Image (spheres, helix red, strand yellow):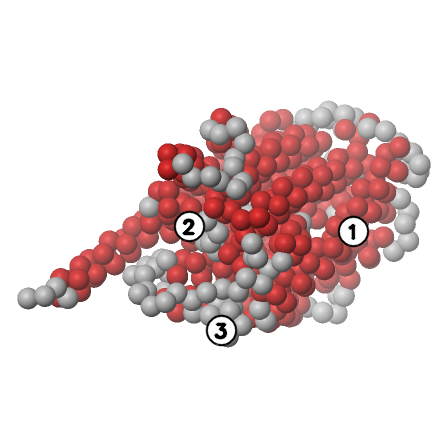
Amino acid sequence: MTNASTEKPATLSRGLKSRQLIMMALGSSIGTGLFIGSGKAIGVAGPAVLISFLIAGAILILVMRMLGEMAAAHPNSGAFSYYAEKAMGRVAGATVGWLWWVQIVVVVAAEATGAAAILGGLWSFLPQWLLTLAFMVLFTVINLLGVGKFGQLEFWFAILKVAVIVIFLVVGVLLITGLIPSDSGPGFANLFSHGGFLPTGWAGMAAGLLIVIFAFGGTELVTIAAAETENAEHNVGRAIRSVVWRILVFYIGSVLVMVTVLPWDSPATANPFASVLAAAHLPYAEEVTTLVIAVAVLSALNANLYGSSRMIFSLSERGMAPKFLSKVTERKVPLAAVLASVLFGFVTVILNFIDPEHILSILLQLVGSTALMMWISTVVSQLILRRRADAAGEKLAVPMWGFPYLSWLAMLLIAGILLLGFLDSAVRIQVLGTFALTALIALLNWIGLRRSRTTAEPETLSNLPS
């Protein structure tokens, strides 16, 4: 942690358009979680994964609305870290920012590895480590070209993903209604005939919840991008309203199709998108779906790399990270912040060379339940900042619904997830690990803040007139 600079702060470009902001939010959340993570969630929860998605979706709606309230009033690339600082102080803001940055840096590496593993199945002559390296280099370059070009590319990435999901939903409905014949037949029998709707119990549903929450991760990038968006007060609110309901339709609709068409305990759920389309006997369904999933994962990589670089930029700008990370190029790109955010991804290239079979699962386990900590910090920050705004008579462009009751409801739902998580040993380890990581980051930031204050005091005294 360093003292905030007294120089004129570097500024980011406001080159993101409203349509790019909306599609970027979709692109960041529709990736590894939906195309790969949904199959894992079905495997641990069975058809009851639908309850997991509904609970997580309800929390997502509330949390995103709270973020929208704060982002429209105070657009900043630090987003929830910046709001935590305003509400609870510098240690809280730095802890939330660093925790999220660490999480997303790991996610970027996981998405590069995941895309390499997917395409490696089609192109076995290309080693996984080489594909991972190629993806890391490509998207590092894209993020250095400027936010306008990045936003345009992410827009078309997201368009492709949305088109595929719409086709998937249409095919799924035709299979369920029997208009397209399938091996399992029409109807909803698969929801109840393989051990019941809740085959693995409430503990399994709780384990599915954490996977689902990871799947929803990335939606918060819309508030990070607010600092580089034209007319942030208007566009952020519009983007959040549009994105949230689209994500819920895409996620819950897709998962409903998966658990209805496929038996939850079938090996086919390992790649549910391709398996559902294969059940419709569409030609080249598996090959085309595999390519689209790889593109979807790479799109999420692109968006998350953007978000992680802007977070570390904001931390540096606020004196919570090394000062050089807040310097920008002539294109208004935080060069050092981007390079710092891709460093771990390049390290995983070596890990992919050493152990390509297990590296992806290891990376996904490292992320754990970090998203829950982000949601908790968002709720607490909004409760505090909203009360201050109401006391000051401030008019908000995107006010939270039913304040403070729905804010507290979100907190109770998150607490319920944590309690359920302790019923499952694997989830318990993830939650405790996240708590330990959060405490460690908080301690390091507290020590850094005390040292920076101690250093600053003699300098201040020496500048006083004799």
Q: Where the N terminus falls, by quadrant? A: bottom left
In the image, what residue type sits under mark 3? Thr
Specify the label residue 374 is tagged with.
none
User: Would you place residue 354 above or below residue 201 in this image?
Assistant: below
Visible residue check, residue 203: yes
Q: Residue at x 49, y 40 (%)?
A: 396
Image quadrant in which you'd find residue 270: top right
What residue would you read off at disc 2?
82
Q: Position of residue 32 (x, y in %)?
A: 65, 51
Q: Do callouts 1 and 3 mark residues in contact (Cβ within 8 Å)? A: no
Image quadrant in which you'd find residue 290: bottom right
Q: Position of residue 446 (x, y in %)?
A: 29, 50
Q: How far apart are the alpha carbons under marks 2 and 1?
A: 35 Å
What residue would you read off at disc 3?
329
Q: Position of residue 401 (x, y in %)?
A: 54, 32
- Tag nearer the camera, 1 or 3: 3
Visible residue check, residue 380: no
**Disc on the earlier residue, 3 or 2:** 2
Q: Residue at x 49, y 59 (%)?
A: 310
In the image, what residue type sits under mark 1? Ala
**Disc on the earlier residue, 1 or 3:** 1
Q: How far apart are the alpha carbons under marks 1 and 3?
A: 35 Å
What residue would you read off at disc 1?
163
**Disc on the earlier residue, 2 or 1:** 2
